[in-house]
Image (cartoon, rainbow, N blue to C red):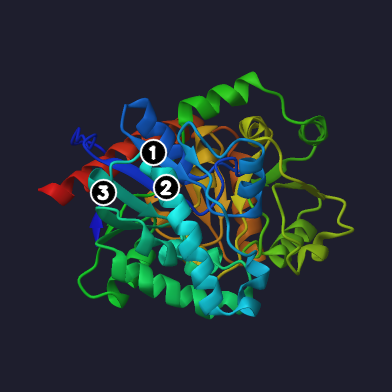
Amino acid sequence: MSESTNGKSGASADRFHLVFLASVGWEFPLISRQRMLVEAWQRRGQPATFVQVPSYRTAIERLLGRGSSGVVVRPWPTYPSRFWSRVGEGRLQRSIAGRAKSLKRDLDKRVDWESAIALVSSPVWAPWLGELPFRHVVYDCVDDLSVNVPRSELTTLFDRWEDDLLQHTEQAVVTATPLGRDLEERCEGLKATLIQNAVDAEGFEARARATQAPAEIAELARGDRPVVGFVGALFRWVDWGLIASVANANPDYRFVLVGPHDGSPGMESVNGLDNVHVFDKQPYDLVPSIIATFSVAWVPFRLGRIASSANPLKIYEYLSVGKSVVTTPVADVELFGEHVSVGETPDEISAHVRARVEQGIQGKEERIVFAKANSWEQRAEAYLDFVSSFER
């Protein structure tokens, strides 16, 4: 597996039009890698389009007159995913083919297909590709496949779609070494290039200074107990049992968790703990100021394939505000160096958290410098260098 050049070559790919077939919506509450890259390309004049993952939200947005605006295209969806296993694969494929033709007509208005490169972020797009005549197809793989599967009964279907996507794909971009290794083992001749996640460090730090955290969260930080915080998707890969154990072992600390949640089993394990505070998703502009209230930031992921294949964007965001980080094992964690402590058990996590709190702001400036060295501008440039290699 090859590694990106970190954008040092000054490559230009403006003769191409980059089309992200995204895995989330443009306005996803936590802001996606795909949106960050598209915005970075737009700032440098690189033609790029963001195709929102089809959903009934996109249909409503189209009906409200927001079909294709700016860099965003919102395609008509097929059946809701909860019906996919009922309607039958043949009927589903026919529906997708019709929607894909409609999407092609939307893209015809803005894309020269001879210069169009698809960056596909989810296997859900595999059955659409037959109707979309992209010049090149790249699999932008950012997570273990299971993250993209909306319902467990669709696992087999998504496995097959990923196999189909790999047949369409010339090369892959991955955010973590294990993802690239897995794809190269599965698809003979496929080359995976590592381009990790990043952060708009300067913008993040500026918003942390310019905005106020929600009152309830800010009030917790003004108390006499250190705050250990997480901001991100509170989905099935979060280890609620670990959170409960660490909170029980550290009654003199507060544990704040902020983000959208899917009602995953285990969340009830923190109910009744007076030092655990769970908040729903917050506006993304407030995320920096929320992180700024933390004494230590953490990533309490459940051990397994999802965590071991993840390059958490939130770690870069934590570091950009100068926060030290404690995490369970994630992919390539050694690349964060001394800025991140890694533990598996509640005892290990507790020891790391206490050590980080005792360190206070020591190392803050170094963490900010690290974050600035891992910017979306640099990742966007590295991506352009990768794309330019197609024509060499």
Q: Quadrant of residue 28?
A: top right
Residue placed most toward the observer, 18 or 259: 18
Q: Residue at label 2?
A: 105
For marks 3 and 1, the one nearer the N-term is 3
Residue placed most toward the observer, 214 or 152: 152
Cα separation between marks 2 and 1: 7 Å
Q: Amino acid at mark 1?
A: Lys
Residue 351, position as x, y percentages in the image? 62, 56
Q: Is residue 207 above or below residue 72?
A: above
Q: Amino acid at mark 2?
A: Arg
Question: In the structure shown, which secondary structural element does the residue marked by tag 2 occupy?
Answer: helix
For marks 2 and 3, the one nearer the N-term is 3
Number of numbered callouts drawn? 3
Residue 129 visible, this orientation: yes
Q: Quadrant of residue 37?
A: top left
Q: Look at 49% across and 34% down and name the residue there.
A: 363
Looking at the image, do the residues carrying marks 2 and 1 touch, with CB atoms under 8 Å apart?
A: yes
Residue 29 visible, this orientation: no
Q: Is residue 7 left or right of residue 248?
A: left
Crowd tier of the residue under label 1, counting other residues whose Cα lies within 10 Å: few below 14, some 14–19, many 20 or above:
few
Q: Residue at label 1?
A: 109
Q: Residue at label 3?
A: 4
Question: In the structure shown, which secondary structural element does the residue marked by tag 1 occupy?
Answer: loop
Q: Quadrant of the N terminus?
A: bottom left
Q: Look at 28% across and 71% down and name the residue there.
A: 184
